[in-house]
Every structure is written in structure tokens, then in C-alpha cells.
Amino acid sequence: MSQSFLSRLPLSRYEIDRDHLAREDPHLLDRLWRDTATRVLPIFDGSALLSAEGSLALLRPDAIERGDTSVYLGRSTSTTGPEPVGTAIVTMELHDAGHFAEASWGNLRSIATRLSARDVGLFTEALSILNWHSSHLFSPRTGEPTVVEKAGWVRRDVTSNIDVFPRTDPAIIVGVTDNDDRLLLGSNALWESNRYSLLAGFVEPGESLESAVEREIFEESGVPVVDPVYLGSQPWPFPASLMLGFMASVAPGFSGPGTPDGTEILDLRWFSRDELAASLNDIRLPGHSSIARAIIEHWYGEPIDQQS
């Protein structure tokens, strides 16, 4: 991944040492909740508590009641944050935010590009791991309740004594270009009709990333592609994806507009750079926090002045 492309991926930024060895201490969370130097990131309904300045509001542990599920995120490595380097940070999911009635909350998709590297890294990590917890309250093997261990990074099936670890779903997302260097964009059935983005899909079991690129693009558009080139990756905790960005070329000998699958993709359009610029009042591109926007701008050659 080139540094220039990496700089386009807001959710891939971080200033946190995940400090994985500390998770082995079974009393770590108890100690951190007693330490007034610890900072807590509250999450409610997928949003993070914000300060008056718009940064994440990290609270002292004695300023918030400890909930059922908390996770040790690690130690800050930021030299510009309000807390000292090495500050331990815990996240916790709130089920009721009534005592924060006057507070401001931020959605990661909306505020990612405005957050510091430390804050966006913490928010992305917190949302990812808490989403996993909410979907693994019961063992996938026995159906029995699981208990939280290793500072929030493992859930144990007590009945079978099996550890259940966090999982991330890999998905490819692809900038497809033809012989004229036009970019293929599609409109998804779940979006408003004028929103267009890159084609993407989940990697299937037993499949390489490159095979997933070729299969997904053909399934959704009928366009055969070759020569997938990896650009970079970005976590996408909505709820648990890792987006792996590629560029690929239309296979030699293929011509035509392609055929949307009619289920996921309802429309396909090829854009030259001039055509895309001329269409910005008529179509909506993916948001600035997404890797899709980063790949489109990578192909375009410069930032595109359009809000999501």
C-alpha cells in the first residue's frame, strides 16, 4: 500500500498500542476501573460520546457506572492528545444513555474525517469489538451463554470450555477500468437511485482475494476482469468488515456496458473523468470515510469536491 493511498483511508489511522500481552491478566479490567488515570470511551447505539470541541469524550472511570461489557482497547501513543502517552483506554457499551441526555453523540461514518488519528482509531476499534460482543452472547457451538474473558477479547463457552474469538469478515471492493480507462460504478438496490459506488462483495470460504475480485465483479455486472492489483485496506465496523481495495482491468476481448444482476445492483455506468465531473450534480458518490471514495479519487487523480 502506498503512503499516498493510505492517507486517503480515514478508518485505517490509529495512535493506539493494543497492548495484547496485558489482556492475559484476568484482573486487568478490575484494576483499570479502579485507576483514575484510566479513560473510558462510552458507546451508545453505535455512536461515541463527543466533547464540546467535537473530539471523543474520554471519561474518568469514576464518572460512569461500569456496565456488563467493557473492553480494554490499549494504551494511547498520541503525543498530541489531552491525556499522557501510555494512558490506558477502555470502551463500554451503554444500554441507556439517559444520564447523558444533554450530551452530543457522533456516528463514525459521519465524523471519521474530522477526528484525530487517535480518536478515529479508538472509535473504530471500539465499535468493531462491541459489535462482535453483541452478536456472540451465546456460543455458536452449543447455544449456551458465553462469558467475557481476556479484558474483553475472548468470550468463553462455559459448557464446553471453548474460547470464542472475534471475527472479521473480509470483503473486496474494486475499481474496474476498461481499455479507455473509464471507471465502472453501480447503484445498489438498497440505496437511493442516484447513488453510485464501486462494486464489492464478501470473500467466500476457501477463496483467495484475487478469485473473489473476479467472481464478485462478474456476478454483479457480467464484466470479466483480470489483473487485480491490491491498493490497501480499511476496517469497516458496520458491523464487522475489513474492506480490501483493488483495481482491476476488463478482460481482453470483452466489450459492452455490462449487465447488472438485478438483485444487488440495479444500474451500471461507465465514467471517464470528464463524465464523472460533469455528473456530480446528478449522482451521489460514497462518503469520504469509505475506501470506495478513496479508490474513486485514486483513479480520478485528485479529491472530488462532493459531500456524501
Image (cartoon, rainbow, N blue to C red):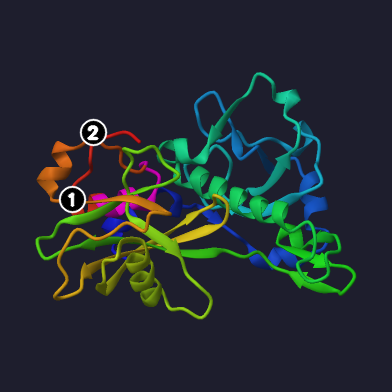
Residue 246 on the magenta span:
no
* SS at circle 1: helix
Above or below, comparing residue 12 to residue 212 in the picture: above
Q: Residue furthest top?
A: 102
Q: Is residue 92 left or right of residue 301?
A: right
Residue under label 2, please give it.
282
Q: Residue at x 68, y 41 (%)?
A: 40
Q: Earlier in the sequence, mark 1 or mark 2?
A: 2
Q: Nearer the viewer, residue 23 or 144?
A: 144
Q: Residue furthest right?
A: 159
Q: Is residue 276 left or right of residue 260?
A: left
For residue 299, which quarter of the picture?
bottom left
Q: Nearer the viewer, residue 141 or 33?
A: 141
Residue under label 1, please give it.
300
* SS at circle 2: loop
Q: Residue furthest bottom?
A: 206
Which of the image's four quarters has the N terminus? Answer: bottom left
Q: Amino acid at mark 2?
A: Asp
Counting every numbered tag in the picture gives 2
Residue 289 on the magenta span:
yes
- Residue 76's spot in the image, x, y percent? 57, 50
For residue 84, which quarter of the picture?
top right
Q: CA distance from mark 1 to mark 2?
A: 18 Å
- Residue 261's spot in the image, x, y percent? 36, 58
The magenta span reads 287-296
Q: Nearer the viewer, residue 269 or 180?
A: 269
How crowded pointer 2 is (Cα within 10 Å; few <14, some 14-19, many 20+) is rated as few
Q: Main secondary structure of the magenta part?
A: helix
The answer to whether residue 86 of the structure is visible from this angle is no
- Residue 251's spot in the image, x, y percent? 20, 74
Q: Residue at x 75, y 40 (%)?
A: 36
